[in-house]
């Protein structure tokens, strides 16, 4: 799922070639008054999705246009080399601007497409407000990297084998195209922990072909001479921003230096970055483009507003389900009880935002700009199957967008404390860019360590270890960035598994770097008044209430149908059975088509009370729901989502430690088996490890120490 879908996908035809474009931010109120940013057709080896870390964020502020290059993406693949001349890319840009009624824009390009942006500014100066050149190629006298000259000299040579830069060869491109981008982009992304960015760019590269690339390679550069190229740069009237990395293995730094010198350009240099900083360092690139576009359009930088009086807390609560917000509300309430002058504002999204607003909490208006994390997870799910680690990796552009929303907010407004409950975007990008920390930061989580699934093989084991290693390195490099790291649980709740080769175990590392709050949940009903609670909720003494729920996400409808199908066999075994299905806020209960006799509810704001009042429950393997049932000492079955490492490993470990629940695999959830398990759960004595009741107060104390 994209962080932001385009307003329009269209085509402009030039000389028989259809040029694909997308627009963003054109359909919002006041759009006509917004500046325009055009990502000119990028180099043919990739397409415009290479800018996925920039487009959603910039579209919050401007109208944005992306154009796929000839030979890739949604644009046609001409078969004659003249169709790939520099000037064709220039005129494609102007044609799309004409078609959309864009009179002037800031143009953004990378590598060769940076030069195309410069050429548009040279040939059509009235159309260009500014040029952003990332890792630019320019027509100057700077010699290429030695590998490129060697590759050029040997491009036509047929050999027995090809390796390294020798893959820059006509015969490789024609006969085994994927081999070249595999090597080339590995060099373009020299930064550690770039596995996802590499996967993305290889996907883009494999949407073209070696034949197309060979045709494009023979396109004509413009102009013909270095002297003309330098005159073009020196004559530009539009301001220029150059962004480059110090480890760019594609374009030598002299080319960027020429562009800076001849245009008096602003320059942003990213230490250690390779040729694709917009992918590997999106926050730096986003901030640089935003500042530049604002400046060339006369938009003043935001003035940071400071309010005197009550201390302000910005609370980021994970929106994937409703479990986090229940505990976050408990922590926030405990913080306010300990500091009555405290003001808490929430940066979050659906379904959490609606839940908080119904409770009278203040959800910051900036939340409307957040891309949907719940929607992403739902899009990633199958039939009771959610590969959570893969889903998090593929949520990268959502996380970039959401961090930038946060960064804009805290640049405008002062907060005295940030609290992030599994706010992965905040924690990751603050560690990547510690200078952006402007307030004390408290990090909360209920698990530590990405865990590979057994069928993921060596690749998944490598990837999870790489992500864990990055986490360890982040904390080692900036040990004080988190003013408090709060684990929601006790040390024994952490799995004692290695984080990866040469890394400590999750438990040992967590004990070293976290404080432990114990489990956190809201106010619990008095177990001595359970019958009174049942009566208030409408449950009769002679009923055996089976509560079936799947949390606040939209992932659980398959399980709801399976369990409801067991109502007949179960009711024949259990006298007085009343099965109550709770769909939550994101599942359409009318679409479930459940059997007669099964009671169905949508969202129940007091679901925790229903958990405490029921006789038995069937739930997914989420931590919040299962721990509510554990604390209430209710028998329950839980069915972890397949491939969900947190439910399959972390939650299961914690429940095993507490002696709580009966685990079932989804494959075993036929009606008769569910009925049998319900009977067994009702007959089994409850002897769970007690769940301490002061977790919220402990977490609040730890957070307030940072304030």
Image (cartoon, rainbow, N blue to C red):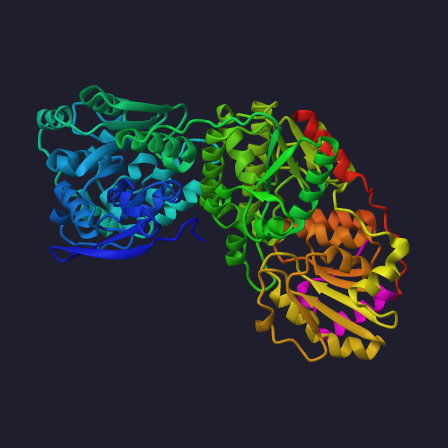
Residue at the image position 62 percent from the left and 56 percent from the top: 552
How far across and down, in percent of the image, does residue 471 sit?
A: 58, 33
Read off the magenta span.
660-682
Residue at the image position 56 percent from the left and 23 percent from the top: 477
- Horizontally, is 72 left or right of 514 in the view? left
Task: Return the residue nearer the eye: 601 or 377.
Answer: 601
Q: How many marks?
A: 0
Task: Return the residue nearer the eye: 34 or 420.
Answer: 34
Visible in this render: residue 187?
Answer: no
How far across and down, in percent of the image, does residue 228 sit?
A: 8, 27
Q: Quadrant of residue 450?
A: top right
How far across and down, in percent of the image, does residue 495 sit?
A: 72, 41
Q: Quadrant of residue 587?
A: bottom right
Q: Would you place residue 675 above or below residue 192 in this image?
A: below
How far across and down, in percent of the image, does residue 303 sit?
A: 42, 27
Q: Would you place residue 76 above or below residue 443 in this image?
A: below
Q: Assess whether residue 15 is covered by the magenta stretch.
A: no
Residue at the image position 26 percent from the left and 30 percent from the top: 296
Visible in this render: residue 374?
Answer: yes
Residue at the image position 55 percent from the left and 62 percent from the top: 382
Of the 4 image quadrants, the one containing the C terminus is: top right
Identify the main secondary structure in magenta. Answer: helix
């Amino acid at each position: 799922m994209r962080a932001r879908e385009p307003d329009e996908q269209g085509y402009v035809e030039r000389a028989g070639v259809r040029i694909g474009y997308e627009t963003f931010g054109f359909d919002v109120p006041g759009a006509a008054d917004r500046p325009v940013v055009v990502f000119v057709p990028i180099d043919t080896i990739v397409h415009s999705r290479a800018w996925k870390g920039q487009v959603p964020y910039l579209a919050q502020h401007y109208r944005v246009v992306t154009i796929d290059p000839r030979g890739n993406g949604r644009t046609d693949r001409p078969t004659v080399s003249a169709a790939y001349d520099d000037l064709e890319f220039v005129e494609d840009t102007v044609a799309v601007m004409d078609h959309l009624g864009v009179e002037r824009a800031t143009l953004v390009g990378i590598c060769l497409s940076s030069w195309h942006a410069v050429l548009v500014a040279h040939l059509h100066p009235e159309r260009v407000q500014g040029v952003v050149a990332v890792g630019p190629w320019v027509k100057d006298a700077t010699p290429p990297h030695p590998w490129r000259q060697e590759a050029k000299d040997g491009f036509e040579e047929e050999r027995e084998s090809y390796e390294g830069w020798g893959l820059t060869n006509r015969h490789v491109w024609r006969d085994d195209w994927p081999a070249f981008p595999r090597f080339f982009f590995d060099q373009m992304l020299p930064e550690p922990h770039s596995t996802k960015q590499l996967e993305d760019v290889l996907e883009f590269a494999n949407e073209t072909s070696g034949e197309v690339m060979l045709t494009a390679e023979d396109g004509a550069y413009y102009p013909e001479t270095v002297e003309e190229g330098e005159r073009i740069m020196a004559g530009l009237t539009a301001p220029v921003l150059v962004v480059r990395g110090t480890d760019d293995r594609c374009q030598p730094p002299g080319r960027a230096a020429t562009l800076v010198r001849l245009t008096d350009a602003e320059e942003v240099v990213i230490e250690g970055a390779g040729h694709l900083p917009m992918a590997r360092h999106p926050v730096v690139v986003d901030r640089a483009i935003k500042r530049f576009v604002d400046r060339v359009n006369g938009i003043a930088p935001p003035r940071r507003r400071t309010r005197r009086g009550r201390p302000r807390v910005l609370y980021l609560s994970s929106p994937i389900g409703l479990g986090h917000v229940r505990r976050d509300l408990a922590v926030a309430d405990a913080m306010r009880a300990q500091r009555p002058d405290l003001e808490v504002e929430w940066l979050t999204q659906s379904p959490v935002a609606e839940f908080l607003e119904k409770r009278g909490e203040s959800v910051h208006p900036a939340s409307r700009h957040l891309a949907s994390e719940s929607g992403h997870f739902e899009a990633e799910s199958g039939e009771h199957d959610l590969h959570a680690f893969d889903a998090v990796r593929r949520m990268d552009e959502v996380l970039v967008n959401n961090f930038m929303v946060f960064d804009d907010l805290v640049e405008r407004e002062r907060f005295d404390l940030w609290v992030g409950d599994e706010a992965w975007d905040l924690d990751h990008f603050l560690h990547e860019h510690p200078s952006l920390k402007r307030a004390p930061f408290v990090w909360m989580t209920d698990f530590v360590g990405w865990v590979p699934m057994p069928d993921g093989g060596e690749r998944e084991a490598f990837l999870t270890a790489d992500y864990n290693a990055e986490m360890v390195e982040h904390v080692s490099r900036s040990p004080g960035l988190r003013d408090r790291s709060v684990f929601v649980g006790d040390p024994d709740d952490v799995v004692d598994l290695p984080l990866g080769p040469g890394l400590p175990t999750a438990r040992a590392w967590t004990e070293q770097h976290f404080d432990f709050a114990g489990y956190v949940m809201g106010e619990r009903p008095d177990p001595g008044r359970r019958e009174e609670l049942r009566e208030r909720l409408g449950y009769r003494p002679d009923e055996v209430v089976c509560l079936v729920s799947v949390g606040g996400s939209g992932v659980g409808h398959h399980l709801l149908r399976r369990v409801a199908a067991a109502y007949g066999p179960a009711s024949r075994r259990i006298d007085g059975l009343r099965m109550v299905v709770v769909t939550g806020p994101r599942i359409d209960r009318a679409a479930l088509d459940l059997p007669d006799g099964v009671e169905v509810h949508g969202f129940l704001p007091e679901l925790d009370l229903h958990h405490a009042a029921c006789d038995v429950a069937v739930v997914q393997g989420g931590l919040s729901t299962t721990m509510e049932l554990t604390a209430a000492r209710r028998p329950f079955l839980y069915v972890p989502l397949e491939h969900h490492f947190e439910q399959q490993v972390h939650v299961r470990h914690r429940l095993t430690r507490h002696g709580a629940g009966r685990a079932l695999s989804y494959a075993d959830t036929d009606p008769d088996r569910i009925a049998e398990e319900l009977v067994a759960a009702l007959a089994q004595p409850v002897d769970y490890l007690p769940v301490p009741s002061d977790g919220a107060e402990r977490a609040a104390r730890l957070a307030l120490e940072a304030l």
